[in-house]
Image (cartoon, rainbow, N blue to C red):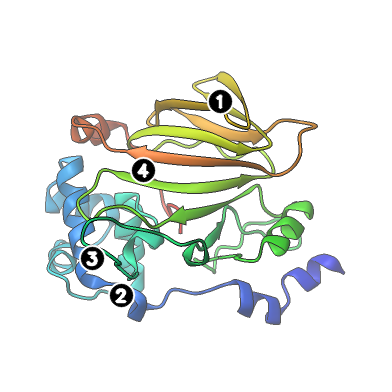
Amino acid sequence: MRSSILFSNETREVLIQKPDKDKWDWELVAQKFRERRKLFGWSVDEVAQRSGVSRDTVMRVEKGKRCNNKSFQALRSAYALFSAQLVKHPVESEHYSVCHADQIRWMAANLKDHKGRPVKDIDYSFVDDATERQRRANLGYQRFFTGFIRSELADGVMSSGIMEIYNTSPVDQHFGEEFIYCLSGEAQITVEGDSCHLAAGDSMVFDALSRHQYAPVEGSPLPAIILFVVANRSDEAKRVADSLPQRTGWGV
């Protein structure tokens, strides 16, 4: 009964937000896509091949033109960008960027139905209510949630977020050098098979192209909450060109 309530039509309508082309800042999308393509050292033709999107569409989007949602999601996935990095948000100063707590959208890690099967027909899932995140984690439907902190500079090299970890995450690889600070609870971070135990106040750093995963420590208070910061490096394009795994549906 609880699981059927979890995914009732009313609940889905509240918790699941499908993509809305009108919300994208297409000038920002164009800027981010151009920067990412140059960072990774990819040509327009290579982007088209990696994403399955036509060359003309890649060029149009880089000029700030709209495209259909399927093409947009394919490009976003190829560039390994979260949706939160591509939407409009207030700029309070030309000297800094800030993200207030009420602006953070909490993204579900792996959406599943009441039988534990991945839900493939819904691309976006945000659960902003902390009590609801805890409830869904207790039911076993979510391993972790990520709150992306939209405070990066327009031409900056860092992105950051907060993770609530309820269960072991899938193994991941992505661009950048990753810094982690444990805010509360205890987390077990495994990098290329080597595990690191973090308690509140501990921090670590690693090459994010290394295979890594996150997990809470058994017996510690749930969830384990970590702050992560990912920064580009001067040789990012060379490192990423052949190392970033091909993926579909990267993040949300």
| Marking on residue 246 | 4
| Marking on residue 28 | 3
Q: How far apart in space, not on screen, are marks 2 and 1 (Cα)?
A: 38 Å
| Marking on residue 109 | none
The secondary structure type at the circle numbered 3 is helix
Q: Say which of marks 4 and 3 sits in front.
A: 3
x and y percent of residue 126 in the render? 56, 65
Q: Say which of marks 1 and 3 sits in front.
A: 3
Q: Say which of marks 4 and 1 sits in front.
A: 1
Q: How far apart in space, not on screen, are marks 2 and 3 (Cα)?
A: 16 Å
Residue displayed at 65% across by 66% down: 129
Q: Mark 3 belongs to which amino acid?
A: Leu
Few, some or many C-alpha atoms within 10 Å of disc 3 (few <14, some 14-19, many ≥20)? some
Residue displayed at 75% across by 69% down: 6
Few, some or many C-alpha atoms within 10 Å of disc 2 (few <14, some 14-19, many ≥20)? few
- Say if mark 2 contacts mark 1, CB within 8 Å: no
Q: Decide which of tag 4 and tag 3 comes sooner along the chain.
A: 3
Few, some or many C-alpha atoms within 10 Å of disc 4 (few <14, some 14-19, many ≥20)? few
| Marking on residue 68 | 2
Q: Decide which of tag 2 and tag 3 comes sooner along the chain.
A: 3
x and y percent of residue 207 in the render? 38, 27
